[in-house]
Amino acid sequence: MEVNGTVVRPLDLLDEIVHRHNTEEGAAIPILQEVQNTFGFVAPAVLERIADLAHMSATELYSIVTFYAQFRLQPPGENLVRVCTGTACHLAGAEKILQAVENETGAREGGTSPDGKFTMERVACLGCCSLAPVVMLNEQIHGRLTPEAVRRLIKAVGRR
Amino acid sequence: MGAPKIVRVGLATCGIAAGADKVFQALAQELTGQQDVWLKQTGCLGMCHNEPLVEVLTPAGESYLYTKVTPEKATDIARRHVLGGEPVRDWLFDDGHYLAKQKRVVLRNSGRIDPESIDDYLEAGGYQAIAKALREMTPEQVIGELEKSGLRGRGGAGFPTYLKWRLTRQSPGRPKYIICNADEGDPGAFMDRSVLESDPHSVLEGMLIAAYAIGAREGYIYVRAEYPLAVKRLKLALAAARERGFLGENILGSGFDFDLKLREGAGAFVCGEETALMMSIEGKRGMPRFRPPFPAESGLWGKPTSINNVETYANVPWIILNGGEAFAQYGTERSKGTKVFALAGTITRGGLIEVPMGITIREIVFEIGGGIRSGREFKAVQIGGPSGGCLPASLADTPVDYESLTQAGAIMGSGGLLVMDDSACMVDVAKFFLDFTVKESCGKCTFCRLGTKQMQAILQRITNGEGREGDLELLEELANSISRASLCGLGQTAPNPVLTTLRFFRDEYEAHLYEKRCPAKKCRALIRYQVNPDRCNGCGLCNSYCPTNAISGEKKRPFSIDQNLCTHCGLCFNVCRHEAISVN
Ligand SMILES: Cc1cc2nc3c(=O)[nH]c(=O)nc-3n(C[C@H](O)[C@H](O)[C@H](O)COP(=O)(O)O)c2cc1C
């Protein structure tokens, strides 16, 4: 892997993250968050190593990873589509948006498309209620969508 | 050389989503290097329906607000108004009503200052309240001022803030902690995000004052993971405050030490509950525990802890600077001050509003919100999200204060206020919230874990047209048991959306149950899509969209829908350009 232009071994990176946080009390969640930010997901083997380094039980780490919706045990697709299903979006037709995304990407809710291009998630609220319905595609929020508009959006990204 | 013209662009999440960053770039292209012009980013002005927003301030202090600005319009505004001196009248915001009924305490700096600049905050009177507290007031006097103000927690429960602080102060354990609850998980609520994105230092200053009053040297801000911009701006604010000596040791030479850590949530709604939140900071699964002991006695790591909401803290510097009495002049007998609401739904003007307590729902919906969009009928407001309730239009004169809302069956909640027109199905809305609580229940209490699932199943069958005699009574019975047998607010209030809709919209439940009919035409199993042959010109667009190939026909002749194949997804209805598809 490459970080700031230098090649580093993933394991070194992992160890460094754990050691940096480990002096803090209650560090398990920040460690897991940084690991996921770095590698995209927390692989089971990675959990074992964190447990060893941080003197925690792997069971405990699993219980945390499975409790919090943010953590992924599987690698995500190239693009992350988050469909907001907050109240305003629900009333503005979020289910139809969700379905259009499923149809267009081939990814089921919470899953990744067969070609690995898209992971699709449902989120409780992105807090852009006046722009409902909204979708967050990677880091960018798109609002006032129609099923048609979201299909176009996904097509455009998929072609890249 | 005169004072500069200031051009401000609202760059909070909603603004950016609406394209404000491109507007900013367009302005920068025209204005960079210009003498006497200062292009600034700022936070949220609260007018989401009008984003992106650009404000031009003249040296004489006049303000011109442009709404729904595109990059092209921005270029024009820069050339004609900022450089040319001639306002572009056609694009100016001309709706004073939106702001006339509002009072800005919490949002005093939002949309005015650059949230990434501590100097901007200082210029707006920032960190003067903590200076005043440290130099002129004892901790007890600070708490006394809060008592006079009547401030109650804005995170939902409305507990008097001064009392929480006093109890934590008097608690014998050491060290003491304070926490800012920025987990804001209610769908439809974005008040706290907006405050953090637009004015993070106000929250830090409020926390400093709280820490001084309570005797805490360490604190945490627990912020929701889905708020990347808020996290970024908080980090910048923390670094700047540390650099200027507002955080750290011997703050302002007073001998008072305090520092803050930022913790990001990991996507669990229940972690907004205070005991669960502390579990999460401790690095565990965020599951609520029984109270007492209350956090004031035994909170984070078993130490006395005071936890407050973002908005609660943002009120504090204002109260210290202006006095508790000045704050208490707003609001009602028992609900003082203002409340920020995220106003959304099918209204004309939506966004972030701050109103004095005691204002009626009607004033919010019609005077601030401009009434229902596209001429439909106002049906209900949902207040308080998954813990709250739906109040019908007939109760629109209910004043917005803690007691009146609770009495009416809703709650103040954290500030989500969703307006619905007659296209909303109230059974569907109740089910929506229950789906949410079922997903977010942590599973600790049986009634919350399984009872909500049972309620969800019943609502599912009612909306599927498979409801049974006695279902409504069963819902009420379950609701009652769940409220009584759950440990935390999540379970205790989870039945509220169902109970209030049953109370005020029972006829809709009955239509689903007995007539197999969804009056709002929302519930998929109870509606039929049909092609109106007189309007259909046979373009085939619907056919190309139908995911189940339920639509067939010959080009240029009316198409038809096979009801056996149709899944009622409504795509055809949405794409048809000739309004040839009807729903019954
Ligand atoms: C399920 C649940 C979720 C909650 N979520 C939040 C939240 O997101 N933000 C918040 O400030 N309070 C939330 N609360 C309320 C907190 O438990 C607590 O009362 C509040 O943070 C206290 O701050 P305040 O006195 O300033 O209102 C939640 C409570 C429950 C039961």
Image (tube, rainbow, N blue to C red):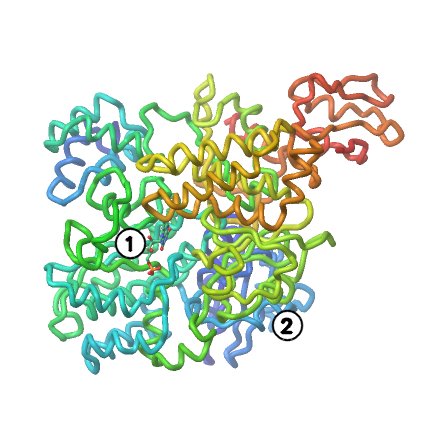
Determine crowd level at label 2: few under 14, some 14-19, many 20+ residues with C-alpha closer than 10 A.
few
Task: Please report the residue visible at 44 percent of the width from the left and 67 percent of the height from the top.
Answer: B107
Q: Count the numbered circles shown.
A: 2
Could you say where residue A119 lies in the image, as x and y percent from the top left? 44, 27
The reply to whether dot 1 and dot 2 touch (C-beta < 8 Å) is: no
Q: State whether residue A152 appears in this view.
A: no
In the image, A2 versus A13, the foreground residue is A13
According to the image, label 2 marks what residue? Answer: B86
Q: Position of residue A2 (x, y in %)?
A: 26, 30
Give the residue type that dot 2 points to. Answer: Glu
Disc 1 target residue: B235
Secondary structure category for the residue under label 1 = helix
Q: Residue at x 62, y 71 (%)?
A: B96
Does B46 sit left or right of B319 as displayed? right
Q: Position of residue B292 (x, y in %)?
A: 23, 53
Q: Position of residue B452 (x, y in %)?
A: 44, 36
Cα gap from disc 1 to disc 2, whole angstroms = 40 Å
Q: Amino acid at mark 1?
A: Lys
**Which element carries disc 2, helix, strand or loop?**
loop
Q: Is residue B347 above or below residue B471?
A: below
Q: Name the front one of labels 1 and 2.
A: 1
